[in-house]
Image (tube, rainbow, N blue to C red):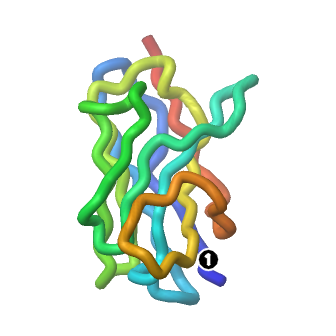
Amino acid sequence: QVQLGESGGGLVQAGDSLRLSCVASGRTISVSAMGWFRRAPGKEREVVAATSRSGGSTYYADSVKGRFTISRDNAKNTVYLQMNSLKPEDTAVYYCAARFWMVESIVLNGYDNWGPGTQVTVSS
């Protein structure tokens, strides 16, 4: 098991930027696929971005492509989500997730380790 903790959320205006961080403990994330998810009020949780074990491959939801960037520093056991040009529709609780994964590939489901989430609110 790996424990995850997100930080960096907050209240910003449309067009602003935020950088979310997810620090892991209990196990190195170098053997895990990592992802960022979000749940907006009244909506189901959705994948926002994902990265392979090395960070060499990334995935983005169409709604954030070109605005968000996922990255990871395995030496620091940390994953980041840089969010630029934020929109009100990006308002949600953002969750970091990990899944033990032996293959260098993107994983979009089956995550079994989750952080408690961090609130991002974008005002218009």
**Percent coordinates x, y for residue 111 in the rendering:** 63, 63
Quadrant of residue 62 within the rendered picture: top left
Please give the name of the residue rendered at 53% of the width and 88% of the height, measured from the top-left corner: 27
Residue toward you, 59 or 72: 59
* Kind of residue at badge 1: Gln
How many numbered callouts?
1
- Residue 9, position in %: x, y? 48, 45
x, y percentage for residue 108? 53, 52
Residue pushed farthest right?
42
Q: Looking at the picture, does residue 92 appear above or below residue 109?
A: above
User: Quadrant of the image for the N terminus?
Assistant: bottom right
Q: Secondary structure at mark 1?
A: strand
Q: Quadrant of the C terminus?
A: top left
Q: Measuring from the top left, give residue 116's x and y in whole percent.
A: 66, 58
Tell me if 60 is positioned left or right of 40 in this view.
left
Which residue does the numbered mark 1 point to in the structure image?
A: 3
Disc 1: CA contacts within 10 A as few (<14), some (14-19) or many (>=20): some
Above-or-below relation of 38 to 76 = above
Residue 50 lies left or right of residue 121; in this view the side is left
The residue at the point 61 percent across, 77 percent down is 3
In this view, which residue lies farthest toward the top?
Answer: 124
The residue lying at 71 percent from left, 26 percent from top is 43
Please tell me whether residue 114 is drawn above or below residue 19 in the rendered image: below
